[in-house]
Image (cartoon, grey):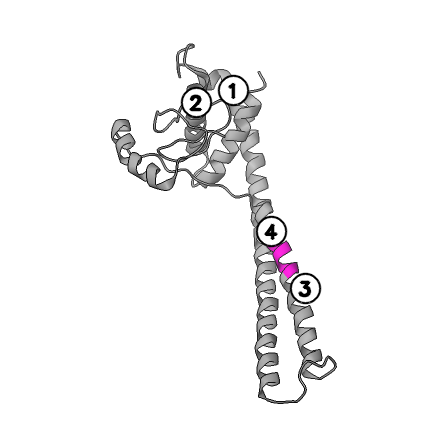
Amino acid sequence: MPWCPVCRNEYREGIKVCADCHVELVDHLEDEDKQSAELDEMQETVGEEPAIYHAYQNSAVRAEDNRVSAYTLFFVGILGFALDLLVFTDVITLFHNNGTTKYLVCGVMGALFILFIVFGVVSMRASRVLLIQAQSEDSLMSELTKWCGDNLSAEQIDEGLFDEDMPEEQKYFKRTDRMKELINDKFMNLDQGFLEHFVDEYYQGMFEQE
């Protein structure tokens, strides 16, 4: 995937120029030391600070990650605590006497496994919250899709926006900027990462299937 050497944004295959910095994209980012040394010089050429990229993380995916983490923590915590109890009650013999070492080791390990279980509970609760958020995002996604289908068309977006001989990657950025502007005018306080994700997905269905 191509990258912008100035703002370090990643782009899709086929795009050659960064829409924000107007510099050619590269296949790989350079080493940090060399990159930081050249960054100031390239920004002076651009004449402005690179735009902020709004990262988007799907709540359903995050919920699934938290759920898997919760089950893992539960399994390790419960199994470990059970083994710790077996050692403490001498069902499993690891210590030849009931000295301080046995009580100290079993106490520390028991507390550790209890923490695993607690973290599992926290992860499960976070997963449930994210599932609710994912449902809200799905509903908003459907609402945005319906509104765009009723109010936006490829012809309306392209009208007076660029010359026909403009490179395709520049058309992409101008189109998506207009789409985001129109959607923001209708839907207030949208998460910009979510909006950029939606516009990119909707763009593919509107223009790239022509």
Residue at the disc numbered 1: 153
| Between discs 2 and 1, the one toward the N terminus | 2
Contact flag, marks 2 and 1 (Cβ < 8 Å): no
| Between discs 2 and 3, the one toward the N terminus | 2
Real-space Cα separation, disc 4 to disc 2, in angstroms: 34 Å
Label 2 SS? loop
Q: What residue type is labelled 1?
A: Ser
Label 1 SS? loop
Name the foreground residue: 174 vs 166: 166
Residue at the disc numbered 3: 75
| Between discs 4 and 1, the one toward the N terminus | 4
| Residues packed near mark 3 inside 10 Å, few (<14), some (14 to 19) or many (20 plus) | some
Q: Quadrant of the C terminus?
A: top right
Residue at the disc numbered 2: 16
The nearer-to-camera label among 2 and 1 is 2
Q: Is residue 110 above or below residue 45?
A: below
| Between discs 3 and 1, the one toward the N terminus | 3
The nearer-to-camera label among 4 and 1 is 4
| Residues packed near mark 1 inside 10 Å, few (<14), some (14 to 19) or many (20 plus) | few
